[in-house]
Each structure stands twice: as structure tokens, then as C-alpha cells.
Amino acid sequence: MSSNTSCSLMSLFFLLLLLILDSADLTVSSYCLRNCGGIKISYPFGIGMGCYLEHSYEIECVNSYECSISY
């Protein structure tokens, strides 16, 4: 395989990967909450099942008027 063909195939692969990742972001964000307490939450973070990249990116939005400080 020539280097031009390899370069073209690699470029095509990365373009397709970007399109897939971009469409996944649009699908997730279309039904997920985007704000918590006036703060915008963007993917890969999310509120609710299926709205974040993985469990460690999950945001729990708690509506409360109490001020709490974690130590």
C-alpha cells in the first residue's frame, strides 16, 4: 500500500470517528438536563442515566436551599 493511500485512509478514519462522536453528543444532549443551579453541564458530564460518558462523569443535581459544606 502506498503512503498516499495509507494517509488517505487514516484521514478518512479520523473524519468518520469525529462524525460519530459528534452525533453521539447530539443524541445524548437532546433529552438530558443541561443546567444545574444555573450552571451549564456539558457532555461528557451529565445529569441522569445515559447522559454522561461514564459513571465517574455523572453529576447529581440536588435542588436545595440549605448551605452545606463537605469536609
Image (cartoon, rainbow, N blue to C red):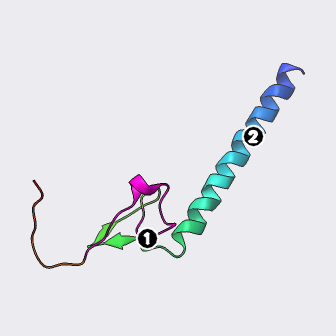
Q: Measure the C-alpha gap from mark 1 to mark 2.
A: 31 Å
Between 58 and 24, the one lying in front of the other is: 58
Q: Is residue 49 magenta-colored?
A: yes
Q: Quadrant of the N terminus?
A: top right
Callout 2, which amino acid? Phe
- x, y (%) of residue 70? 12, 58
SS at badge 1: loop
Image check: 63 left or right of 69? right
Q: Main secondary structure of the magenta part?
A: loop
Q: Which mark is residue 13?
A: 2
Between 60 and 14, the one lying in front of the other is: 60
Residue bearing the label numbered 1: 48
Between 34 and 46, the one lying in front of the other is: 46
**Range shown magenta:** 46-62
> Which is more foreground, mark 1 or mark 2?
1
Image check: 8 left or right of 62? right
